[in-house]
Every structure is written in structure tokens, then in C-alpha cells.
Amino acid sequence: MSTKEHQGPLIVAIGGGKGGVGKSVVAANLAVAMARHGARVIAVDGDLGSANLHTLFAIDRPGITLRALFEGEVKALQEVAIPTKEPRLSLIPGNVALPGSANLMHSRKLKLIRHVRKLDADAVVLDCGAGVHFNVVDLYNAADARLLVATPQLVSLQNAYGFTKAAIYRQLKYVCRGQAETDALAACMTHSETERMQQLLERVAQKEPGLASAIRQQLAHFGLTLLGNQVGDRKELNPIHALSRMVGDFLSIEVPVVGALRRSGRIHYSVTAREPFLSDTPGDIESRVLKVLARSYLELDRQAVRAKRTRPADSARPSPEQAEKKVPGPDPDLPASISIYQRAHERIEVVWPVALEVEGCRYGAQVRDVSRGGARLIWGGQVRAGSPISLHFERLPDRPCLKGRVAHVRPDGLGVEFDLNTPDEVLDALMARAAEQAAEAEVA
Ligand SMILES: Nc1ncnc2c1ncn2[C@@H]1O[C@H](COP(=O)(O)OP(=O)(O)O)[C@@H](O)[C@H]1O
Ligand SMILES: [Mg+2]
């Protein structure tokens, strides 16, 4: 048995909170992309409420479903896997037309998670259902990596946020070690919708510093990425980025936007035709996004990912039932209206040369978009996330200089956050200039 097999499959969960955003389409095509990359893949329909992953693979009525595992008809989940037309890819269909199957019993859910981890495959793509029910969230949290799918529509963004919040808060309960920590966490939870994770952590740190740092570790390694779907044009990417920033600000987890799939007749038609849309056609951006994603997942060191998410010496951890009882769930409401959030950080595309100052040296860079919160730069140099920087806008009137820090580093450049105490007048002038330039560009 190879080391990889011994570790169990890499599990990637697809979630998003709302039905109809494209979780299943993404799950099916990501699984195909992984299989075409050479991996042995099993797609699992974990949407226990409305299982339909099989239809995307042109399977009308699966002869066997997850139900067989729950009813004890099979010993191992592996026996439920049926082949698809795609080499190396099999499918574990969900319960079809079984009323109430979304309300999976706790013991059945744990059994499902246990069995998924033992599947004989390189990777498992787990299509999670909609909603914030513990069953959905626990399946999602059991994975090694999570892909959040959201469309630019407000309801989808709200649900994606609510779903992420539910998943994170649920995870915190399992971090607690012993009754004292569980009680401390429960006591620190408020139901204020504007509560930031940071505030909760500060209160926890006063009572149980060990717990606070264990939670920080969980947050840092939650392994969540965001994929926009049904995006109409470049402008519609803004709400997706707004969601990413909002999750970062309120829930203290980094959720990079890994890409976006456009709203396309071809994808829509692929569902009707019951075939994956993934192709090798040059210029097929949607397929390329999923292929890059598939490759990056397959390259993940799952052992390292799991080690980072495990709190050492967890023998005194409360049972799941204990944890469930003691700690209240999060307030499902949004901390701020995402539309306000989006407006507050509206990005304007620009092409501005700028001098980037890092560790006392100045480099030439180009600003590609700017908001009141920060900017995106194209720069070929190397810098670490979190490093303090200054941006000298020498070609703009007044030649403003803004200080901030590197928020994230991407292969093609950086995201920069401006200092919170940047004077409003400076930001006003900067945004006014950007808006002017955008208007000029539109006229041209
Ligand atoms: N990028 C896209 N372009 C066009 N239509 C899409 C796209 N993604 C999804 N759809 C449509 O949305 C429907 C719902 O997708 P599905 O994956 O079943 O959603 P979910 O699993 O989140 O409920 C699909 O039947 C398909 O017609
Ligand atoms: Mg679905």
C-alpha cells in the first residue's frame, strides 16, 4: 500500500449554502478534471436533501445509493461506487426520493464521514447540500479542503456567508478540550450580529489563552477557497471579492477567490445534455479554471493539512454530543449588509504606475484596481503577506503616499490593504481621480 493510500483519499468538499448556485455542476466537473489529470476519483453526492449528481453523469436511476450504507445492506461505502463514462471516475449516488433524508441521524452522519475517509481513491469530491444544518456543515468540515461556490446574486452571497459562519463556529466547538474550555467558549459567544471573530477571540483569550490560540490555528488552516459561478461580466466579480473580504474581516479566515466561471449557455446546456462541460478546447476559460484548481488540490500535502488542523493531545476533548449541547450556534444573520460592504469597498479599475516601498527600497509597480480599503498591484518582486508597505502615487496630482500592508500575494502581483487611519481626504482624492479616469476610459 502506498503512503498516499494509507492516508486515505484527499477530500474536497463543495459547499455554498444556497441551492441552484452550481455546486453540483462544479463538483462533477472538478471531479472530471481530477480524473483527467490521472487521479482515481470518487464523486460523492452528499446533498442528502436533493441528490442529483448522478443526473449530471447521465445516470437515470442509480441501482444503489448511499442508503445501502445506512441500511446496512453493504459493509463498505466502496461497494456503492458505480463507474461513470469518465475513466478513473466513479460516483456514489445520494439517496434519491427519500423524504426526510436530509435529516440524517447523527450516528449515520458519523458513519458516512468515517466511510468516506476510507474510500479507495486518490481524491474524493464531496458535493454538499444547501443550508446550515449540522449535517451539511459537518460533512463540509470533515474534508481536507473546502470550495465555496457563490454567484454574484445577493441571496447567494448572504447564504455563502451564513454557511461559512456556521461551518467555522461549528468547528470551534470541536477545538475545545475538556469541560472548562467548552464552558468558556459558550460564555464568550454573543448573539450580536456585528460580532467579529476577533472580538470573540479576545474574550476567550482572557479566560482560556490555550483555547484562543488553538482556535487561531484552526482559522489559519481552515482551507477555504471561493469560486464565483454564473458571473456575467467583470463587474460581477466585485461582489465575489466583497464576500471574500467580508469573510476575512468578520470571521478571520482568508478566503482567496480562486477564479470564476462565467454564466454560459454551454454550461447550462451541458446539464440538460447530462454531460460534463469540461473540454480541452483552447480558450475555454471555464475548463481551464477547473483544471488549475484540480491540479492544485491534487498537489496538496494532505498529511500536512490534517496535522495543522489537529490540536495535539486531544484526549480530553468533549464528545460531539457534549459540544453540541453546551455551545450555542452563531447568529445566522449577516453582520453587515453585503451590499453596503460592497459599496464601502467598491473597486475601480485603473492603470497607474506607482512606487512600491518595501523594507526601505523602492520598486516600480502598477496599480490595477483601487478601493477605499486597498489596491491590487502588478509587481514581479517578492514580499511576504503582512509586510508593511508604502505606495507613492508620484504621477497623481498631490502625489499622495499611502501606507498599508500586503494582504495577499499572488503569482501575478499583490493585494494591499491601506492603513485604517488613512485620512478620508486622501482616500476621497484617490477615489475621485480613479473614478474620473474610469469615466474618461469609458468615453474613449
Ligand atoms: N456557469 C453556469 N452557466 C450557466 N448555467 C449554470 C452555470 N452553473 C450552473 N448553472 C445552471 O444552474 C443549475 C443549478 O446548478 P447545480 O449545480 O445543480 O446547483 P446546486 O448544486 O448548487 O443546487 C444547473 O442546472 C445549470 O443549468
Ligand atoms: Mg446540487
Image (cartoon, rainbow, N blue to C red):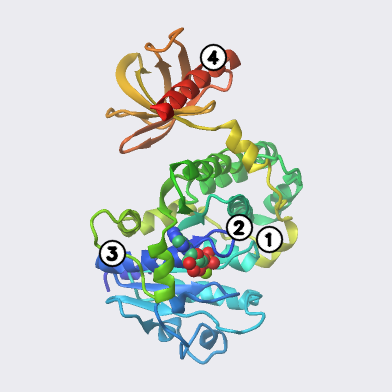
Q: Which mark is residue 381?
A: none
Q: Position of residue 434 (x, y in %)?
A: 47, 22
The amino acid type of the residue labelled 3 equals: Ser
Instruction: Give the mark nearest the N terminus, 4 or 3.
Output: 3
Q: Which residue is mark 1?
A: 323
Separation (CA) of disc 3 from disc 2: 41 Å
| Mark 2 surroundings within 10 Å by alpha-carbon count, few (fewer than 14), some (14 through 19), many (20 or more) | some
Q: Nearer the viewer, mark 1 or mark 4?
A: 4
Q: Nearer the viewer, mark 3 or mark 1?
A: 3
Secondary structure beneath label 3: loop
Give the camera-side residue of 378 and 190. Answer: 378
- Residue drawn at (47%, 57%) of the image: 146
Q: To which quarter of the image does residue 339 belong? A: top right
Q: Which mark is residue 426?
A: 4
| Mark 1 surroundings within 10 Å by alpha-carbon count, few (fewer than 14), some (14 through 19), many (20 or more) | many
The amino acid type of the residue labelled 1 equals: Ala
Instruction: Give the mark nearest the N terminus, 2 or 4.
Output: 2
**Quarter of the picture holding the C terminus:** top left
Separation (CA) of disc 2 from disc 4: 45 Å
| Mark 3 surroundings within 10 Å by alpha-carbon count, few (fewer than 14), some (14 through 19), many (20 or more) | some
